[in-house]
Image: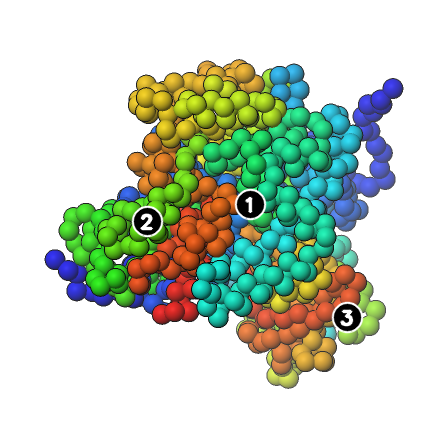
Amino acid sequence: MIYENTYTANTQLKVSPFFERTSKLNESQEWRRWSGYLAATSYELTHENEYFAIRTKSGLLDITPLKKYIVEGPDSQQVLDRLVTRNIGICKVGQVMYTPWCDENGKVIDDGTVQRLSENKFRITSAEPNLEWIESNSIGMNVVVKDDSFTTAALALQGPNSRAILNSISSKSLDSLKFFWMMETTFEDFPVSISRTGYTGDLGYEIWMDPNDALNVWDLLIDKGKPFGITPTGLHALDVARVEAGLILLDVDYISSRHALIESRKSSPYELGLGWAVKMKKGNFIGKQSLLKELDNKSVWSFVGIEIEWPEFEKHYRDVGLAPGLPSTAWRTSTPLYNQNEQVGYATSGTWSPILKRYIALAHIKSKYAKEGSELKFELKVEHFRKLTKATVVKTPFFDPERKRSCPT
Amino acid sequence: MPNIKKYDAIVIGGGHNGLTAAAYLGRAGKKVLVLERRHVLGGAAVTEEVFPGFKFSVCSYVVSLMKSNVMRELMLPKFGLELLPLESTMTPLENDYLLRTADSDQTYREIARHSKKDAENYMRFGPAMGQIGMAVRPILETIAPNPIQPSFSDISATKKILDHIKSLSSQQFEYLTKLMTMSSSDFLDEWFEYEPLKATMSASGIIGTFMGPRSPGSAYVMLHHYMGDIDGAFRAWGFQRGGTGAVSMAIAKSAKHFGVEIMTEASVQKVIVKNGRATGVVLDNGDEYNSNIVISGLDPKLTFLKMIDEIDLPSDFVSAIKNFRIRGSSGKVNLALDALPNFTCLPGDGHHLRGAISISPSYDHLEKAYDDAKYGNFSEAPFMDIILPSVLDPDMAPPGKHVMSCFVQYAPYDINGGWNDQKREDFGDVVINTISRYAPNIKDIILHRQVLTPADLESTFGLTEGNIFHGELTLQQLFSLRPAVKWADYTTPIKNYFQCGSGTHPGGGITGSPGEMAAKKILGTL
């Protein structure tokens, strides 16, 4: 007899409020751990369609595992300004800011977004738990810090058709919602906040809601989004998109200074390409003095985009009789980079970009080799043997479509 | 009245190869003008909104063979090249189906439902053909050398190819020889037993060709379709977002970026030849444009027999071009649909609608379809390669609606009694009836249908006899013989007159390759 069993499973991992739907849609049953949650790696047997949904239609991602904190009270802006490197003083109600935050030595602890929900209420998102860090830095201030991780569910809707999908559901139009701003609206009877943010470098939104409404919101999106090609999307596709967007990932591209075992594992915002997010003109903030010193002395390390040049890459494979061996998913293995015979850096994540048709990576490089156009050698394994192949320092984001920031006119 | 402006090069025809050649010449700093007869660019790689809100890749509908160096050198991704994966092939059958997907285990399981032996062999077949694709690549990427009175570069190209052939393994050599000579059915019989699998695979050996799967030589056409790779994966097919016209537009944008001028609705009547030398072109409206060289992206018949007076060409060459086989064998039916087709064998929406749908249940089905054409009729039950572009790219149709592209074979150019409106509609009906055997709801969901016969392909797109490859891909007209011996290196018997269309090496499909190699040859001689 041929058996026909069905899949039922148990888990000790946390499941998100969307799991009732995502678990049934996940045809590959490939899951990755994300902050102790089960998060879909890819919904289909291969992730290509999901990746192209992000770039040509619209990908729907469950991002509930993000850490979320509410900072509320008369001193909340002061607390956040002390905590992060961006100038929260100029963050208007309804605005969102991406920012890193540092320890006293100016080394990055985490990075995330700060949403100004009202004059005296903020939501901060992060990759790792930060409650204790926020609380210990607000002692004596008139604020209440609340862990919002399990009280707010979140979805990301990313890709060129995202706005059209939301407009077909939302009671208010999203046409005038600008990049890194947010709004309150309703999906039928369900109140949601929508921020024009994301981790793909495309036109995209993140939707924040009461976990009790999660399934209703999901169903509305899937139903109304269908004619626009909405596609449940997993982390494999996101990995590719975020490298194309040149966005860093904690524990992959850098290590939080709070648990780096040795000094050399820590990075300052300048060393992560986040110098633009350090606002020296604002008042004191954690790490400012150290960062001022680093500014004077120039950072030893830089964080750049590199492109692995195709002709030489292809030749390495042709030489052994193979077609070029492109990675089928984004990788996150530290890979040495050389100038002549000296190692001058390492790439921390990379991917073949199906939309750009370029092999790209993000890398830490000693600053004197980090200028745009600098030639490097990238270490490659071809049939178990190490080869060096040409790579060039290029501008990031690798992929930066106009639609990411533009509004319909 | 002669136009005062003088160009380094004029390209006749804004098809994808003409645009590619122009872009390469512009990139090298040349002053180039492209003249396109129609109001839209792209030739057979064109997207048109034939029915309000519904966009059709009117002729050519998928992309696989686009050369990666062309994409890179012309920066096509920057200018809008976006290839979505076409992941699966479904062959609907009377009470069952055959499905092959992007996942090899799933494909193994699906084929094993029909034949375990085939399922295993299929796992070996893909890599074997990939290696053959690799083996043939260097030949395709070489400007075809002239074996008669070879020049130094001909000799070195020949040596390079011979050295390459010597480097092949005995198995590669065996497969290659078989693929060059056998029929696709004989070749596939050596590998597989399940009829629908063999028939569907053999179908890529007949596309665009006036042959059946049992005709010797059809295996080569199959090989031609294996040589495409997308992102290094051989045999991957892609769908351009916005239709194949968007590929042409990306190349056109690249050409413009490199300073190329492009004129549409500029129909070239003749190439101006003075003392055996091309000096420019004259348009239908009498305008003249002068240039140092003229390049034709048209097929060999138009390039030589229409654009040039016979008297200016050597007589043996004229007869070679007259004998060049360019029999059209296919038609195209584009449908605007109110809903998705519902296949009896696999009802409802699903991943199977995201790939190719092949109406190829058996060799007999294909061969009988060919028999009809052999005797001057369109097939009563044609072979079809169908895709649903709107499933891959919802922007091709209004929300919730769909477009369906049906490549149909056979429809002979030389049909008994000639093509007329009635025959076109009859042909359209046969196509719909054939689909309705597998998806009975099709008749109820058609909002609009566009039927293109080989005669339409000729009159609208300038494809002589409606041949989609600018001439059949058969051994006697490949490589150093495409389109004629001595003139396979993009030169012609007329000085300063060059050719860059699919009728030159390495042939048809959206490759950019003839355009690229012609430009490189020209830049070497300019």
Q: Secondary structure at mark 2?
A: helix
Determine if residue A147 is in view: no
Q: Which residue is mark 1?
A: B224
Q: Which residue is mark 2?
A: B318
Quadrant where the C terminus of chain B lies? Answer: bottom left
Q: Chain of mark 3?
A: A
Q: Chain of mark 1?
A: B
Furthest residue toward right: A1
Q: Is residue A282 left or right of residue B313?
A: right
Vertically, is A101 above or below B135? below
Residue A367 drawn at (x, y percent): 63, 78
Query: In the image, what residue occupies the spot 63% across and 54% down?
Result: B134
| Badge 2 vs badge 1, beta-carbon distance below 8 Å | no
Q: Nearer the viewer, residue B369 or B485?
A: B485
Q: Label 3: how many residues lie within 10 Å, few (<14), some (14-19) or many (20+)? A: few
Q: Which residue is mark 3?
A: A265
At label 3, the amino acid type is Arg
Furthest residue toward left: B1
Q: Is residue A46 left or right of residue A32?
A: left
Answer yes or no: are tags 2 and 1 on the same subunit.
Answer: yes
